[in-house]
Amino acid sequence: MKHSNNRVGATPKPGRRYSDAVQSPYNIGRGDLVYVTTYGCQMNDHDTERMLYQLELNQFLQTQDPSEADVIIINSCSVREKPVHKVMSEIGTYRPLKAKNPKLKIGIGGCVGQQEGKNLLAKSRLLDFVFGTDTIDSLPQILQEVRDQNKRVALTSMDHRGTYEISTLIRNPKVSSFVTITKGCDNFCSFCIVPFTRGREKSRLLSELVTDVKVLVERGVKEVTLLGQNVNSYKSPDGSGGFGDLLRAICDETQIKRLRFTTSHPKDFDDDLIEILVNYREKLGDFVHLPVQSGSSQILERMNRGYTREEYLEKVNRLKNKMPHVALSTDIIVGFPGETDEDFAQTLSLIETVGYENVYAFKYSPRPFTKALKYSEQVSEVIKDKRLQEINDLQERLAPTAIEKYHGQIFPVLVEGPSRTNQNILTGRTTHNKVINFDGKMDLIGHIIPIKVIKAQQFSLRGEVV
Ligand code: SAH
Ligand code: SF4
Ligand code: F3S
């Protein structure tokens, strides 16, 4: 379907996304309720924020209850295991709601939407619209067509134009907010679908990002997480700097209290970044997520990761020498095609050598379009399960030592809000990115206060206000 950019009367400036032009509300929503479910990475969490921003601007209201919704959106992820099946079965669960409320419209966005496009409309009559990772800003117009003209719409075009200009659209910024610095990925790791669902890598202007953070600070934000598939390869399109320059500029020129980033790619993780982590420790904390994927150089090569086991370990050593307190976490894929027992043993030994705080391990899942899909020597599910279990067992064995060191320590913690599981206690994260829960008054939210660790568990700490 051809989509007109100025359907609701605004004329976009050349080279700009629709959202930049639409700054006044249109009554597309008429106060109707939208329910969104979100899967996948923090980029998707942030995209949901952007969707809700666009929709509220157009007079929709958010609901947490699908049974009262007039619009349901699934913001999907396709990085692993049967993603299409998952979204389709979720849509199936909404069938009774459609029978009850004939006005209800259901849509799929995110990476499955991008990947499958209009094919999804053919899979289920319950589905009314599909949009992609690059058409979020067109959501109001899509909904106008779907609701007012009774059309079924699929809009998944990718914006390949020059620079990447989007505003950080957040309705009610929390203490901790996201800012996207790059979109897409050019690395083409042989297992990964992201370059196909998010397109080519594009960076936003450094000056624009600094302004975004300043505005968020003015709106009460204390911590920003910079998002990109490979933040280290960030490069301002006007030549004003790379990722290190961006971090320095945000730390020096804004009043942000905490600055985090994800994800760092080991191949581009350099000494400049280590130096910045040391120099701006107060803001950047003592934590790096550095996904290794495998401990075997042979597998890393087949994964097209761009580093060997030795190079990875050397970078980790350089980092630890300068930052002895650093906490590291990683992602691992088990059962990549051709992974032998010896390769896997090397992954176990690398995990032990590095001593990660957290290991996120996944069974290799063949993805469409990717190079590894065609690799022979696929590993059986039984072996994948066994290897996954071995990693989890190893982590369980290593975890007590990794977390015991926190017992009795005092950390400056940014109080983020009530805990998700218990509204009566407060939660925040230590400088090591460990979740810490503690009792305290709600007016502490947004402040950095000293918290003493009284109980250390693998996934969270229990603390008390000092
Ligand atoms: N850009 C990030 C990763 C994004 S995807 C990076 O390069 O580190 C998040 C994680 O999902 C990856 O680190 C990888 O461990 C996992 N993953 C990606 N594709 C996968 C696949 N096909 N099968 C299993 N795990 C996968
Ligand atoms: Fe995927 Fe690799 Fe890009 Fe990460 S760096 S998003 S794993 S292709
Ligand atoms: Fe998933 Fe897309 Fe993120 S595939 S991990 S939601 S980039």
Image: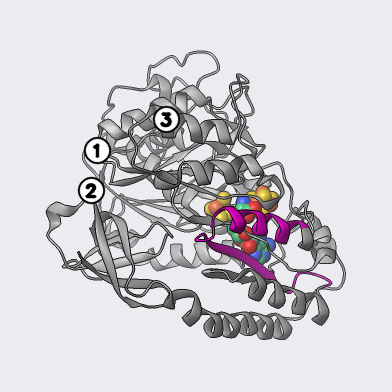
Choose between 461 and 100: the one closer to the eye: 461
Where does the C terminus fall, quadrant-wise? bottom left
Which residue reaches farthest right?
376
Q: Nearer the viewer, mark 3 or mark 2?
A: 3
Q: Residue at x 72, y 46 (%)?
A: 187
Which residue lies under the disc numbered 2?
446
**Does the magenta-highlighted stretch encompass residue 51?**
no
Q: Residue at x 59, y 63 (%)?
A: 330
The answer for how far apart the CA atoms under marks 3 and 1 are is 18 Å
Where does the N terminus fall, quadrant-wise? top right
Choose between 157 and 412: the one closer to the eye: 412
In the rendered view, tell whether residue 341 sits above or below residue 17: below
Disc 3, disc 1: CB below 8 Å?
Answer: no
Q: Residue at x 56, y 79 (%)?
A: 395
In the rendered view, tell whether residue 290 sits above or below residue 362: above
Which residue lies under the disc numbered 1?
220
Expressed as whole percent of the image width and height from the top left, the position of residue 223 reads 35, 44
In the rendered view, tell whether residue 346 sits above or below residue 272: below
Expressed as whole percent of the image width and height from the top left, the position of residue 268 reads 69, 45
256 sits left or right of 264 in the view: left
Disc 2, disc 1: CB below 8 Å?
Answer: yes
The answer for how far apart the CA atoms under marks 3 and 2 are is 21 Å
The answer for how far apart the CA atoms under marks 2 and 1 are is 8 Å
Residue type highlighted by circle 2: Gly
Expressed as whole percent of the image width and height from the top left, the position of residue 320 reads 59, 58
Give the magenta range. Answer: 311-338
Which disc, if any, is residue 259?
none
First reached walking from the N terminus: tag 3 or tag 1: 1
Q: Residues within 10 Å of mark 1 (few under 14, many from 20)?
A: some
Expressed as whole percent of the image width and height from the top left, the position of residue 148 reads 35, 35
In terms of secondary structure, where does tag 2 sit?
Answer: loop
Which residue lies under the disc numbered 3?
252
